[in-house]
Structure formats: structure tokens, C-alpha cells
Image (cartoon, coloured by chain):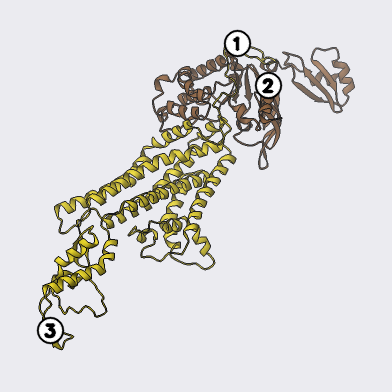
Chain colours: A brown, B yellow
Amino acid sequence: MSGAVLDKVSRRKAADSPWAVETHGLTKRFGESVAVNSVDLRVPRGCAFGYLGPNGAGKTTLIRVLLGLTRADAGTMSLLGYAVPRHRDLALARVGAIVDEPRFHGHLTGRQNLQILAAAREPAARGRIESALDRVGLSHRADDRVTKYSMGMRQRLGVAACLLGDPQLLILDEPMNGLDPAGMHDMREMIQSFVAEGRTVVLSSHLLDEVERTCDAVAIVDRGKVIRQGPITELLAGTSIEVEIDCSTPEAANTLLAGSSHGQVTVTEQGLAIALAAGRIAMPSPRSIESS
Amino acid sequence: MTTPPDTPVQSSEHNFESDVRPGDRRGSPIPTYAMIATRFMELRKRRGLMIALIMVFIGIPTIFLTIRLLAHAFDPHSYGPAGGSSVFGTTVVILFSFGFIVAATLGCTAGAVDLTEGVFRHLVVTGRSRVALYLARIPAGLAIIVPLVAVGFTIVCAVCVFAAPTKLSFDGTNVPIGLSKTGFVSWAESHPDQVVCDFPYNFNGSLNLNVPCGPNGHIIKVTTSRGFTPRPAPSKAQLDAAAGKIAEQNYKEYSQTFLTPSLSLMVEAGLWIELEAALGFVVGLGLASLMGQRTVPVVLMILLEVILTPLLTRVQIPHLIDGQRALVGLAMSHIEPSALPAVSGIHGGQNGVSLLTESTTVAVVVIVGWVVVWTALGVWRMATRDA
């Protein structure tokens, strides 16, 4: 099969993929330290997806790996259905991203910085500069040097840079950093408007509240590993929280809890594993088990 | 808040462009015109750097020549003409050496600023080939350097031609410039005293004028031939004829001594300076891209040009001679225009100073090698670097 035919096939497959981002066993190490630890991630198309975790959890590293800014040590990944890094150029054609804080050439104006980035994209990107500036509310300051911009204005210019490629997927790394409450509100509204247009937004943050307000689904990451992911409503309801309880007579404890409404109980070698029912935060009292 | 769908959701409110549009050769290593143009803009807008470039390529020769013009205009007896071949050689040296350094500074800036200013990752995220991102900087930088060198060099040429001296001091005698052989002989016959007394000649004894000379090339009195037998002074016709013969003998040297640089020399010297500046830019670009910063590469380039090259082109170090021959400065010295005077002093040219020998072919290979190797290193580092 010729290269052109292969390209067509891969594009058709990409369009059929239900996932904006998909990773399997993605791993990135820095020496002994594992920054991204065998991450399996699925981000559905057309939603706001939060990537939540504390500072140093590996959020930015995962984004850098996804975008080809650094190489993965193991695993596979795809963006918009395109395998990366093999079809990186095709994938990134419709991806916009802010990684870390957005930085620009300070001696140039906002518009000139966008011209540089648009030139690296397809010819049509140049025609999107004005609309992107308008969309983020920077048209009136577009001819000022970036050195005169506030942090919030730089964040907005970063979003404008993302829009140059008419992206189906936006990856925003801590976009609320350095923003005042009004700026955070504006950013939140902007993200929601992108989702309303059918774009997918991946938002990394260490702020649970922010993710809860903005996102439809979330993955929680700790020390490089995704520990939970799913629709945010389900995660907040806690359906999949599992509690393990050590006890000397698991069978007896299971019999005792059989008629209760604490959740699904499984007997293990050490004791019991209890999956809490949706919305329940109360756990069975160990004392009640002991007394039986 | 909505629950994320399990299947793809494509909004009907926004029609996305197809993934790759016509004209979008994103994976191609060839940079687009727009990439080159915007990179040119980014460099051109660096005010401090542009001032330094303009100062070196245009300002220094202009100031130097203006001072010489004014000095000669106000006091022509103390200060020689502003133009001429020697001034041409001096200003070419300035443009050659300082041009390399400032061009290298521009190259180092172009090679490092995207990294140091955090823009590199924005560019990589576009999906554009990193090779294309690198290569776009070369024509953009050259589009700044080449015209600046051309303007500065044109000013030098103009002054050196139009303000050149109108008389040539040839072996102590002022001779009009640009004379043909007939004209030179004719002039000699009309100034026999100066020619006979001041011009060198060797006729193996066949010409025995017996005309002792005084100050300023004037014959002062008739004396004896070989100090023994008094002989009459030569007649005017004899002196004129002798002067003509002497002039014929000296014409070759006269014709090779020029006051205004010839057109071919100016073209060759201009191209030579352009090549040196372009080399400085390309090497600086590759080095800065390799190191990921600007300051250290600039310092290294200055060391190369000011210290290493002059030293290593003059000293023969056993077992290291081939390595010395790989110096781009030595190679550039060997392709220096042969008629260019005065370059030897600073950079190690062909005139006056003994350089390591090197064939022109080797020199060309070394120059091409430097361009290719540094570009390859810069591209490789850019393609493999974490953004």
C-alpha cells in the first residue's frame, strides 16, 4: 500500500476514534524517579476533562509527553485518534496547548507573537489571528509589547495561540495560575464555551474546586499514577471507593454485614473489601464488627 | 454539569477544518516563506542587536572614513586622502573581523532565544517539523546580515574610489595615476631628473649617465665617470632618452601599484566579507542551538576569532597541523582576494605574515565542512531536545 493510501486509512481510523486522548501504560522516568507511571487514560471527545493532582504529581510531564515535547519511556498514546509520535504532525494539526505558564517574545507585540506561531501552522492560521485575539478579549492590547502584559493577559494570549489551529482538542496546563477571581471566572467561561462548540478541553489543575466547577470528567493523579478516573458526578458520589478492613474472622464479619446497606462486601484473605454505595460516606464501624 | 459521553460528540455548532489543509506541509523539513518572514521579523525587532549590527557594518566604516575625509579637507598636507587602496584594505579588515563576531552574535541569538524565552515549546506544539523550525532561521538571519554588509561595503568602496589620491608616490616621486605605458614613458621623458635620480634601474652597465643627484631628485653637477676621467654632463636629449628607458623598465611595477581598488577586487572583497559574516552566523546558530543558550556561545565565537585563529594559523604545532588546517579562519585567509592589501595584520592573510600552508581546495572543503557540520549539530540538537 502506498504512503498516501496509508495516510487516508489512518485519517479514517482517527476520525472513528471516540477518544480525544488515549494512553496505555504511558511511562516517563527521570533517572530513578518515575514522573508518569503506566498511565491508562481515556478522554472522551467533546467534554471538559480535568487532570487533577497535587503539585509534583506528574501532570505537566504527562502533557509534555502527549505533545511530543519529551519522549515517553514506555506505553502507547494517541491524540484525536492519531498514534503519537508516529502521526504527531497530523495529530497536532488540530491540537492547541498551553504548557506551564505561557511565555512569549517580550520585545514583540501580542499580534506579532501570534504571527510567528501562525506561520508554523497551516496557511489559514494567519487568518484566525484577529478572531482569536477578539475571542480572548485582547484586541485592544494586541499591538502592545508582551512585556507590558499582566499574567492574566499572557494566559489569554496563550489561549489565543491555541485557537490559531482551530483545535478540536485544547490542553491547558494550570490555566488559572496567576489569575485573579475575575480572570478565573473569564477563563472558566471560555473553557465552557469551547466545550459547547464541540471541542475537547483537557485541563490540568491542582485545584479540586476548579476542576469540579469546570469539568465533566476527571482523572486523579498521584505520584505519576492515575488512581481514579471517570465522570465527575460519579467520582463525587464515591461509587467506587473501596475500603479494606483487616479482621480475624472475615466470614463471620461478612455474615454480620450481609443484611446491611453499607455496600458490596467481598471476603479477602486478610478481611473484607467494601465498595461503598453511591452517595454513602458512612462506613461500618469496626467496633460493630468486633462486637459480633 | 454534564456527564461526559461514552461516544464521540461532535458539535453541530462549529465546523472544524479538516485535519490537514492544502498547503500545510507540516512534516516537511523545508520551512515555508511565512516561517522565514516571521523569524526575520523576530530578529529585526531586537533593537539592541540591530543597533550593534548597524554600528559595526555601517557605523564604524562610515565614522572612520568621515573623519579621514574631514581631516584631509581641513589639512591636506598633514592628512592623506580618505580613499585609496590602503584605506580600502584597512576597512575591509575591520568589516571582516568585527563582521564575523557580530554575525555570530546574531546567529547565537537566533539559535537560543526560542529556548530561553520559552517560545520553543509553542512552536513544537504546532506539529511543525523541528528541522524546518531550525532551517527557517538561516535565510532569515542572512536576510539581515547580507544587506547590512552590502551597504557598509558600498560606502567603503565609494569613499575609497572617489576620495582616492590623484597622484601616486612612486619611489619618492609623485606620478600621475592610471597612465598607459606610452603615457608613463612620456611623463618620464618630461621629468628626467626625478626619474633618473629616484627610479631604480638595472641595465648591466649599458646605461652610464654619471648624474649625481641632490635632494628632491635634481641633478646638481657634472662629475667624473668612475671617479677618474672627467666627462661632460649628458645632454638633455640623452637624459630624456635615459628617463624613457628607465620608465619602460619600471612600468610593470607602476601598473601593479594601484591607488583605487579595481572593480574586480571590490567584488571579490565584498563576497569574501559576505562569506565570512554568513559563516559567523551559521556557526553561531549551530553552536547556540547545541548549547541551548546565547552568552557562552558568543564568548566562544569571540575567542575563536580574536585569539585562537590568529594564534593557530601562525604557529605550527607538531602532530596538530592537520587540526590547525581545519580552522575556518585559516581557510578564509587562504581564499582572501590576492590583490587585497593589509589584511595580513589582524586575521592572518596572505600578505606579509607566514601562514600555515593549505591548498585552495582544502580551504573550500573546510569552509563547506564548517557550514554542514554546525548546521547538522544544531538540527540534531533541536530535533532531540526536550521542549
Q: Residue furthest bottom?
A: B228
> SS class of the residue under badge 3?
loop
Separation (CA) of disc 3 from disc 2: 112 Å
Chain to which the residue tagged by mark 1 belongs = B
Residue at the image position 29 percent from the left and 49 percent from the top? B157
How many numbered marks are there? 3
Above or below residue B322? Residue B144 is: above
Q: Nearer the viewer, mark 3 or mark 2?
A: 3
Same chain, labels 1 and 2: no
Q: Which residue is mark 3?
A: B231
Neighbourhood count class around disc 1 (C-alpha, 10 Å): few under 14, some 14–19, many 20 upward: few
In this view, B40 is above or below A96: below
Circles 3, 2 touching at the beta carbon (< 8 Å): no
The type of residue carrying mark 1 is: Ser
**Residue A136 sits above or below residue A108 on the image:** above
Where does label 2 land, which residue? Answer: A12
Closer to the camera, B25 or B236? B236
Q: Is residue A73 left or right of residue B245?
A: right
Quadrant of the drawing holding the C terminus of chain B: top right
x and y, in percent, of residue B7 in the image: 70, 15
Q: Which of the marked residues, 1 or 3, is nearer the chain's N terminus?
A: 1
Check disc 3 and give the amino acid type: Arg
Q: Which residue is mark 1?
A: B12
The subunit carrying tag 2 is A
Question: Can I make out residue B58 in this image?
Answer: yes
Q: Is residue B52 visible?
A: no
Amino acid at circle 2: Arg
Query: Residue A202: image x %, image y %?
Result: 61, 22
- Across and down, in percent, residue A3 comes to 67, 30
Q: Quadrant of the N terminus of chain B?
A: top right
Front residue of A128/A158: it is: A128
Alpha carbon separation for disc pair 1 and 3 = 119 Å
